[in-house]
Image (tube, rainbow, N blue to C red):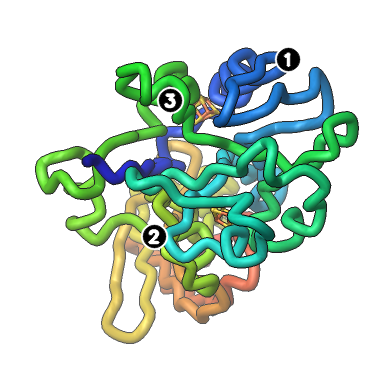
Amino acid sequence: MARYGMIIDISKCIGCYNCFLSCRDEFAGNEYRSYSAAQPMEGQDWIRVIEKERGQYPKVKVSYTPIPCMHCDDAPCIKMAQDGAVYKRDDGIVIIDPVKAKGQKELMSSCPYRVIEWNEQEQLPQKCTLCAHMLDKGEKEPRCVESCPTGALIFGDLDDPGSEVSQFIASGKTEALHGGYDIKEKVRYMGLPGKFIAGTVIYGDRDECAEGVTVALNRESERREVKTNAFGDFEFEGLEDNTEYSISITAGGYKEQNILATTRKDIYLGEIALKNS
Ligand code: SF4
Ligand code: SF4
């Protein structure tokens, strides 16, 4: 028997909302008996896409993070449920029983990811089923995975060492969305954005963009080097949170510039003018 899991590669997510829309299309107004009651036509999203603006003008980026149920192996929702109203199937999918869970509104607060929603009309907690009703009929993937145009959602068998999901996990590149919960999430993430430091270098004596200038980033034994582009811009991505980095800028005939920056947030250093040596 397979044990299902999913990897969400944030670096590939373009925020098209196809996953959200296909999930709504599958479940809104549609009941799948023993798996899920119909999702209300409004007000629920079983995979929500969180949009986050990063940086400051003029260096602003947007990242998108799709968040479904994580189908945790050590799920708090299962522990809190009365009468076995939430259970884990042999294939690892966590299901809220649409009959037994009636009235158990408190289940919403059991989930640290806050992915359990309340159906007021049915008096029922509801969430992503990983499209178990489709998988049981022989479909290979949930609707959201099928509809993702960029391959940001990867689905497969965690017990098959040859599956893409297993190989990514073995590579050590995946992580839980929140590492501190310790609930063995079977939906894992890759490419979660770290902080960035960016800036624009100009020649102070000529007031021109400084192209091809060497910018180095240093922290303890870590060192990275980039060249400024035609606009004098440089950028270092994927940096640690709350960490002090030293940036040095060197160009022939100009004094070296050294700047300290701490990544409490994404940082745009603004225009940095080089002075003649
Ligand atoms: S993400 Fe939340 S709802 Fe889903 S299995 Fe984990 S605790 Fe339960
Ligand atoms: S369908 Fe894919 S690319 Fe589009 S928002 Fe969802 S995960 Fe991102």
Q: Position of residue 88 (x, y in %)?
A: 46, 51
Q: Of circles 3 and 2, which is in front?
A: 3
Residue type pointed to by label 3: Pro
Q: Secondary structure at mark 2?
A: loop
Q: Nearer the viewer, residue 13 or 270?
A: 13
Q: Of circles 1 and 3, which is in front?
A: 1
Residue that sits furthest to the left in the current view: 162
Taking the spot 48% from the left edge, 72% from the top edge, the residue there is 182
Q: Position of residue 32 (x, y in %)?
A: 59, 21
Instruction: Indicate the quadrant where residue 253 lies.
Output: bottom left
Quadrant of the rendered image holding ligand 1: bottom right
Q: Secondary structure at mark 3?
A: loop
Instruction: Indicate the quadrant where residue 185 lies.
Output: bottom left
Disc with the residue nearer the chain's start (3 vs 2): 3
Q: Which mark is residue 175?
A: 2
Position of the N terminus, as image quadrant, is top left
Q: Which mark is residue 29?
A: 1
- Does the Cβ of the disc 3 residue fall within 8 Å of ligand 2? no
Taking the spot 61% from the left edge, 25% from the top edge, the residue there is 20
Taking the spot 69% from the left edge, 63% from the top edge, the residue there is 110
Instruction: Indicate the quadrant where residue 35 lies.
Output: top right
Position of the C terminus, as image quadrant, is bottom left
Residue at label 3?
Answer: 142
Q: State the separation of the CA atoms marked 1 and 2.
A: 34 Å
Residue type pointed to by label 2: Glu
Residue type pointed to by label 1: Gly
Q: Residues within 10 Å of mark 2 (few under 14, many from 20)?
A: some
Above or below residue 106? Residue 208 is: above
Q: Residues within 10 Å of mark 3 (few under 14, many from 20)?
A: many
| Residue 124 falls left or right of residue 47 | right
Q: Of circles 1 and 2, which is in front?
A: 1
- Does the Cβ of the disc 2 residue fall within 8 Å of ligand 1? no
